[in-house]
Amino acid sequence: MTSLYIHIPFCKRKCDYCDFVSYAGKEDLLDQYVGALFKESQALTPHPSPSTIYIGGGTPTLLSVEHFEKILGALLITEPSALEITVEANPGTADKKKLKALKELGVNRLSIGAQTFNDHHLKTLGRIHNSADIFRFYEDARSAGFENINLDLIFAIPGQTLDEWKSDLKTAISLNPNHLSTYNLTIEEGTRLYEEITNNKSLGAARDAEPVEALQITNNETEATMFEYSIDALIAAGYKHYEISNFARPGFECRHNLNYWKNGNYIGLGAGAHSHVNGKRWANPSSIKEYIGCGSVRRNVLRRAPDDSPDATDQRETLFLGLRLIDGLAIDHFAGFDEEVGQLLKEGLLQRNNGHYRLTRRGIMLGNQVFSRFV
Amino acid sequence: MQIRNFSIIAHIDHGKSTLADRLLEFTGTIEKRLMRDQVLDTMDLERERGITIKAQAVRLEYKGYVLNLIDTPGHVDFTYEVSRSLAACEGALLIVDASQGIEAQTLANAHLAEQNHLTIIPVINKIDLPNAEPEKVMEELNHLFGTKPEEILLASAKEGIGIEEILQAIIERIPPPSGRIADPLQALIFDSHYDAFRGVVAYIRVMNGHLKTGDKILMMGTNGEFEAQEIGTLKLSLIPRDSLEAGEVGYLIAGMKDVRELRVGDTVTHISNPASSPLPGYRPAKPMVFCGFYPVQGEDFENLKVALAKLQLNDAALFFEPETSAALGFGFRCGFLGLLHLEIVQERLEREYNMDLIATAPNVIYKINLTNGESKLIDNPTKFPSFAEIRSIEEPYLKLTLLTPAEYVGKIFEIATSKRGTYVGLEYLDPTRAMLTYEIPLSEVISEFHDLLKSASRGYASMDYELIGYRESDLIKLDILLNNEVVDALSSIVHRDQSQYRGRLLAEKLKEVIPRHQFVVPIQASIGGKVIARETIPAIRKDVLAKCYGGDVTRKRKLLEKQKAGKKRMKHIGTVDVPQEAFMAVLKLGK
């Protein structure tokens, strides 16, 4: 199975927490960019017959219907209904007409970046939409015929209380999406949010006074409680917890992402997109201009540690990716890691179940302590 | 040939190295195209920290005179070495920054120069700076040394202003050396360094008599006998000569394999016709500050031993011997002249020898008087006898001199008092600058005293100290327990009055620096088995990557690798992972 990922690194505004490859105010390059994507997909040899296509961003819905047509036209050689074709969409960036057109082009899964229904916290994140936009957009998507919709939610936003998060989950569940991703906010260095938080801190220390409405990082206890609550509430609402951060109605697990976690083959198209084919990884240049310039040439094959044979690295990656899945990984994948597994079983982070090793509930909470044993 | 021997006394950053560079250039000792900044500071560390660690000497020739410049180390840890360098000279340039005024260490070194009967040539440097206040500095110099304005030279080493005047003053004001060639040989060793090919190179000033290649020589302090294999003068390289005579400065190579075979301050004489007495001022090397160095990875013990031995080749004051800690395993107890010396050695081990080290908090040597009438010296808190055996404890005391802009006197008072300082006196050098004197335990000065002083005075206050002897103090041992086990490497000696407070602060600090574990980690501070403070590190409840963005697995793998490497760099004590900085926490408690 091969998956295709297409990256659209354009946004109206870059969110304050985002450290992904995406740029604001470069929409004038959209046509050229889609042209380069077209060329890159034409150059794929052999032409892949993907099982899933995922158009992510950035904000893919900034593309016109014609753009989508051109990209998908270059990639689809089979009947699209057999595929899972996802497009990421941000509330307010597509109207009902565009959504309908996407559906007609074969897009059958929509992933909506809702993040939170709290307007104050949406501002903290630097999102350009408000909660009303989410509801409208969701209804438009449904009425455009989308029967497989994911909502992305973020918790542990600076200043967010447990009750506010509970309320977000309740609202999300009431919309009845087929899939929910709940991500703990990571405040990455170099993002605006990071700067804001560190500056507030240092200003506060220097003036020895309370800064005005300083953003507070959520503490570990609250994060843990929020996460545990999410798991309990979503399972109670009939969702299956199938990956650390992902929940789905039975049969609606994201096939594209499952392929990542199973360390399958995928080809990434577009600026900054990553690929993994038969144990080899590489990435495209992340600058839009450079990507357009180099057309279909792929570069920057990611470096592996010289003393690590590709097989060993690939096994390690298979393990730490696969253990993210709640069902875990078949025992034969763990060859050579008896000591680590034994220790993790003893620590109560791993358990054996149906010929698989999988994370315990505690192991889910402390996943990094498990994964880091296998790198 | 007429000779002048001189050194330069200056505070860090007041322009000593730049002035030395200009003198080398002006006298044509070094060609301009070969010139780089701080020629005499050969170690990277010296350049980076802007300090001179090793003394150096260089021979300049100017208008038919030989001018020997003997550079001095610029830090209080090396006061003895400075005094020996000064003893090799007849004069000194006293460099003061026109915008900063005189600093405590410069003052102390200038007093040392006076004690050695050196002619002092005051130079106010950096007069080109917009905030230069040469008149104010003149007033200070007058107050401190009775210097008249017309004796003071104005210069900017950076801009090359006043260099010729300085050279002229060296020739005119500094007296020529007065030794007698006919007397038995007395040569002062004022520094040495280790050369991988030639062994130890001693820097000497011949005070009386003369020394020839092939002479059989005796080190009067250490009693070592050698042959003078090669002697010569010092330019930027070694220039061999057949002989050196009274008044001259040069080098001596005598087949020594280790700098500990000689001692700075020792006197070289002939075996056949020895001098009746050595030159005054010799003192054996005596470390004042001790700490433990432990490899993070136990298997690096041998590498650490080799690295320390290599450093010791060029550092006679460095002391080390193996020791064992229940918590840290095998390591070394190391002795240093002071805190800077310690930091330099630690940094060189980490940088030049790639050692991953845990350094325990430094301590002084305590003198323990036992109930059975015996006394012993203790260089490690873990070797403290039990309460019942101790009659009294003595610790080293310093006379501490602080120079500061007057507005910070209040704050410095507070710091000194909180560090058990006894006030001795306060004197105003001019209306805006004050000199404070305290008697204070060395142990307080080697912790965070300097940092506190600098932050309380926005960097303007400076300090200098000298050891004045041992005094009895009411000291006790403060232990730390992690997960209910005593961690010997975290024990410290504190004053009884401060023990509660320091115990509480230390527990708090450790809670900050020790990461959360999967289980709760109790931290306790205890004295004589009685717990006086308690903190708890809660168990980590959540530690998991939320997302695997768009297939960028490599980035996530690197994050996990970093987490794994971070854990590996910590010391595993029982079931608790303790990061390196925890062992220094005792030093950084705030006042």
Image: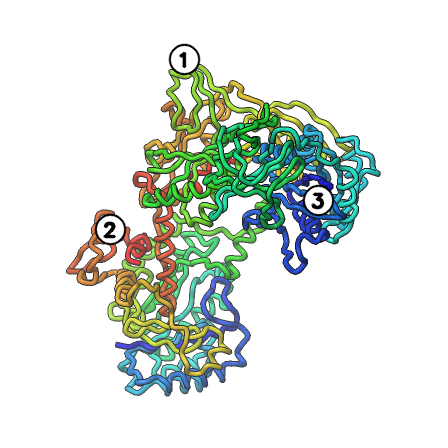
Residue lying farthest to the left in this orientation: A354
Q: Amino acid at mark 1?
A: Thr
Q: Is residue A125 left or right of residue B186?
A: left
Q: Are marks 3 and 1 on the same chain?
A: yes
Is residue B455 visible in the rendered structure shown here?
Answer: no
- SS of the residue at dot 1? loop
- SS of the residue at dot 3? strand
Q: Amino acid at mark 2?
A: Leu
Q: Quadrant of residue B52?
A: top right
Q: Nearer the viewer, residue A276 or B7?
A: B7
Task: Pinpoint the chain carrying mark 1.
Answer: B
Q: Real-space Cα distance between discs 2 and 1?
A: 53 Å
Percent position of residue B298, x then y: 33, 43
Q: Residues within 10 Å of mark 2 (few under 14, many from 20)?
A: some
Q: Residues within 10 Å of mark 1 (few under 14, many from 20)?
A: few
Residue wearing tag 2: A344
Front label number (3 vs 2)? 3
- The residue at 66%/46% (across/down) is B59
Mark with earlier residue (3, 1): 3
Residue wearing tag 3: B66
For the N terminus of chain A, the image quarter is bottom left
Percent position of residue B192, x then y: 54, 40
Q: Which mark is residue B371?
A: 1
Task: Pinpoint the chain carrying mark 2.
Answer: A
Q: Is residue B356 left or right of residue A129?
A: left
Front label number (3 vs 1)? 3
Q: How is the image coloured?
A: rainbow
Q: Is residue B263 left or right of residue A178?
A: right
Q: Real-space Cα distance between discs 3 and 1?
A: 61 Å
- SS of the residue at dot 2? helix
Residue B477 vertical position relative to residue A48 in the rendered view, above or below: above
